[in-house]
DNA sequence: CGCATAGTTGACTACGCTCAACCCTGGTGG
DNA sequence: CCACCAGGGTTGAGCGTAGTCAACTATGCG
């Protein structure tokens, strides 16, 4: 699929003029709410830089992190179909987004096949990341889950060193744990010799690939 | 988005001839493996009737149900992007599928904008169901989780009666529980007066909507 | 210098998993 | 027609582990 033409929605200058005309660059400070869960879904966003987290609140008040969107990734894709956002979007750090009104995108779909492909790829990546997340949640033992998480982080790059760029707190809820549990899991993994750790930098030891 | 033209991939007669030519109807008996996790992703499927479950095996042997596809829903969508299937597909009951070779679909994308929209909608629905699933997993207390699950089942239809069309065993793993836990949760919910139950038929009582 | 926040560590609790026995139904075969 | 068996489902006892509450340290910032 990559061999086909795509639209790079992060590069404004490469866009056809009608899309370019509706795209708006938007700045969000750390902690800022881009949109709220249940709000009318008017726009679709692409993260240009920074980090935006998508989270969903259950009735009981618990909060689930559905996705952490990094540069190039889409936020609020459900807007394309649904009338309301199914989750809230919050900038974890100061971030820059490009905002596309949903109607403009929908209208552009039949005109630019490349746009459809771009969106399809985007959605497929989201599906993949959700699948991984779901699989992670099914590992109950904290150390195993953390280990698996770390492995997923490294498999993209070549190195087996992970540097957390976000507070452990965030990572914990991301994993579905309390900060305490994450902390304990990390120390136990270190005691077991499976990882080394200095502060936010983790080195994965290759032993026991199972 | 619904107002735009779409291709109904389940209706062979409504398809353009080139797509019609590559679509293959395929029968699967109960328990049959449609494709295996890690296998080369050559095709994309639509469930015509029956029920197909997508599951993923973790290294430790645990198994996670990612999706249960019912008639009209897509199976193996990741084939569109990835080279291998990220999960296995297994027919829970005797089912009929329509098989589309991925290359044919990809080639058809720029030609039929309606196809792209159909696929987008399909993917968005998958994303939505994954989000729900993920949210469910975050509710630790078994009774709450089951209750929430039941509510999701009813909110589509008007009635507050759910009839399980699959063994409790399946539903349990679907929810991320053991059958024992699900059984206990159901009896406790009944004792608490929140539901009534006769065998596989559950009636949700409207009390305590929280 | 003091306050807020991130992170760690400890003790206790709670709840789902595991293992096991048991019931019940439907199907099969003598 | 009954005896047997297999599988789904329920119930019980005990264990393990993540959550909770709490105290404490360390770090950064005003």
Image: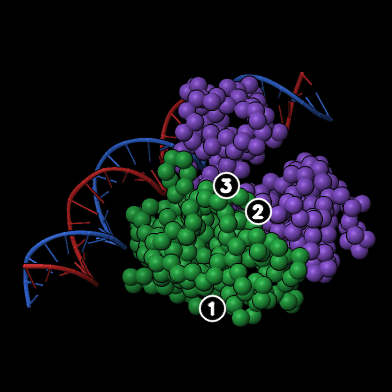
Chain colours: A purple, B green, C red, D blue
Looking at the image, do the residues carrying marks 3 and 2 touch, with CB atoms under 8 Å apart?
no
Q: Quadrant of the N terminus of chain B?
A: bottom right
In which image quadrant can residue A79 be found? Answer: bottom right
Query: Residue at horizontal 79%, vertical 42%?
Result: A50
- The tag on residue B81 is 2
Going by the image, does B88 lie left or right of A199?
Answer: left
Query: Residue at horizontal 57%, vertical 26%?
Result: A204
- The tag on residue B26 is none
Query: Residue at horizontal 67%, vertical 72%?
Result: B18
Looking at this view, is C1 or A112 the one in front?
A112
Q: Are marks 3 and 2 on the same chain?
A: no
- The tag on residue B158 is 1
Looking at this view, is A192 or A57 the one in front?
A192
The chain that hosts pointer 2 is B
Q: Is residue A38 visible?
A: no
Which of discs 1 and 3 lies nearer the camera? The answer is 3
Going by the image, does A111 lie left or right of B143?
Answer: right
Q: Is residue A186 above or below residue A20?
A: above
The chain that hosts pointer 3 is A
């Amino acid at each position: 699929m990559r061999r086909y033409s795509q639209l790079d929605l992060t590069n404004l200058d490469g866009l056809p003029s009608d899309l370019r005309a509706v795209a708006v660059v938007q700045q969000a400070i750390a902690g800022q709410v881009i949109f709220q869960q249940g709000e009318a879904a008017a726009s679709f966003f692409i993260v240009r830089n920074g980090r935006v987290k998508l989270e969903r609140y259950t009735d009981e008040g618990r909060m689930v992190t559905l996705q952490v969107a990094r540069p190039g990734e889409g936020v609020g894709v459900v807007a394309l179909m649904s009338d309301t956002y199914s989750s809230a979007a919050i900038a974890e750090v100061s971030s820059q987004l490009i905002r596309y009104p949903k109607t403009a995108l929908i209208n552009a779909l039949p005109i630019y096949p490349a746009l459809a492909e771009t969106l399809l790829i985007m959605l497929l990546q989201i599906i993949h990341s959700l699948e991984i997340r779901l699989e992670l949640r099914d590992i109950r033992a904290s150390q195993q889950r953390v280990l698996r998480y770390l492995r997923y982080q490294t498999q993209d790059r070549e190195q087996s060193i992970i540097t957390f760029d976000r507070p452990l707190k965030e990572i914990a809820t991301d994993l579905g744990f309390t900060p305490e549990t994450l902390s304990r899991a990390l120390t136990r993994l270190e005691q077991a010799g499976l990882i080394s750790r200095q502060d936010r930098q983790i080195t994965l030891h290759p032993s026991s690939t199972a």
